[in-house]
Image (cartoon, rainbow, N blue to C red):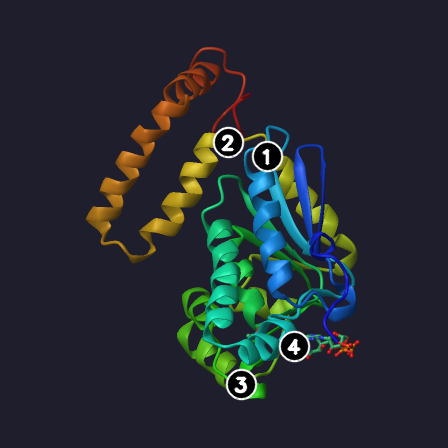
Amino acid sequence: QPDPRPEEETVRYEVADDIAWVYFNRPDKRNCMSPRLNRRMKQVLEELEFRDDVKVLVLTGEGTAWTAGMDLLEYFRMNEDKGLGAVRQSQRESYGWFERLRWYEKPTIAMVNGWCFGGGYGPLFGCDIAIAAEEAQFGLSEINWGILPGGGASKVAQELMPFRKAMYHAMMGENLTGRQAEEQGLITEAVPAERLKDRVLEICEALKKKDGHALRATKWVMRRIVDMTYDNALEYQIRTQEALHSFGGKEARKEATKQFLDEKSYKPGLGTFDT
Ligand code: ACO
């Protein structure tokens, strides 16, 4: 049966201490992504993006899953029954929020508390940093039910993992633990489940102290340069740094330099200037 709850309830969020905690909120369905969840997630991300009290966004899941991928009932079967228009519409809604997340104006962290399958690789890659419980499980399970890893999932594996590992992962439909996912480059770091939130909080606290505009420019540069030649990347970095000046970048740099050279209040090699 389709989820009877209203669309608003498919995603839950709270903002505390300048951190937005966003939850996939269909724990009974292992947080699989229905068209309604995808629509709601896009709205929530947009609502939070420019709030002054949001400096970092954490995407996590209620219950035992981060997300069990696309909803095989509401996203696939029910849509396909309605025809091509419905299929394209729901693809655009899901790919739309994955894309929004990839280019989000604030730093983002995936806090992977449990299952992460297939379509979940889109938002996993969309987040800048991914910290998982060692007990979490990651899988391109598509092959286990007769499709290929679409919706960006195969591209995510190919981008993040060594090619031989990515190919095996896509073809075999076997799951990786958080620890294996870290070793193969799919996530940043795996920690025991009981340390997960504390570790994510540590990272949030560190990010909160950085200059927000410089962080935004840094994450965009890191993503954009992936498919650029060295010279184009260099040029793009120069232009992006100069564009930062429209948002106080020059003043921030002057201040940071003064704190180091004149006031000797910090060392850039060992910490962050006082913003
Ligand atoms: N789509 C639709 N319903 C789902 C999905 C999904 N992706 N994942 C879980 N559910 C539903 C189950 O049908 C079940 O519903 P019910 O209570 O109405 O029967 C409920 O969520 C709980 O699921 P269980 O299987 O009972 O939970 P369990 O904890 O035993 O297993 C697991 C969790 C391993 C995640 C299992 O649910 C599963 O294999 N889900 C599918 C994972 C998957 O392959 N996703 C698709 C990836 S490919 C893609 O995204 C394009």
Label 2 belongs to which residue?
Answer: 212
The local secondary structure at tag 3 comes to: helix
The local secondary structure at tag 1 comes to: loop
| Residue displayed at 47% across by 77% down | 165
The residue type indicated by label 2 comes to Gly
Find residue 176 and report its horizontal and vertical position in percent: 61, 75
Q: Earlier in the sequence, mark 2 or mark 1?
A: 1
The circle drawn on residue 143 is 3
Horizontal side of residue 206 vs 258, given as left or right: right
Label 4 beta carbon less than 8 Å to ligand 1: yes
The circle drawn on residue 73 is 4
The answer to which of 173 and 119 lies nearer the viewer is 119
Looking at the image, the residue that sits furthest to the left is: 231
Q: Earlier in the sequence, mark 1 or mark 3?
A: 1
Q: CA distance from mark 2 to mark 4?
A: 40 Å
Find residue 125 and report its horizontal and vertical position in percent: 50, 59
The residue type indicated by label 3 comes to Ile
Label 1 belongs to which residue?
Answer: 55
The residue type indicated by label 1 comes to Lys
The answer to which of 239 and 148 lies nearer the viewer is 148
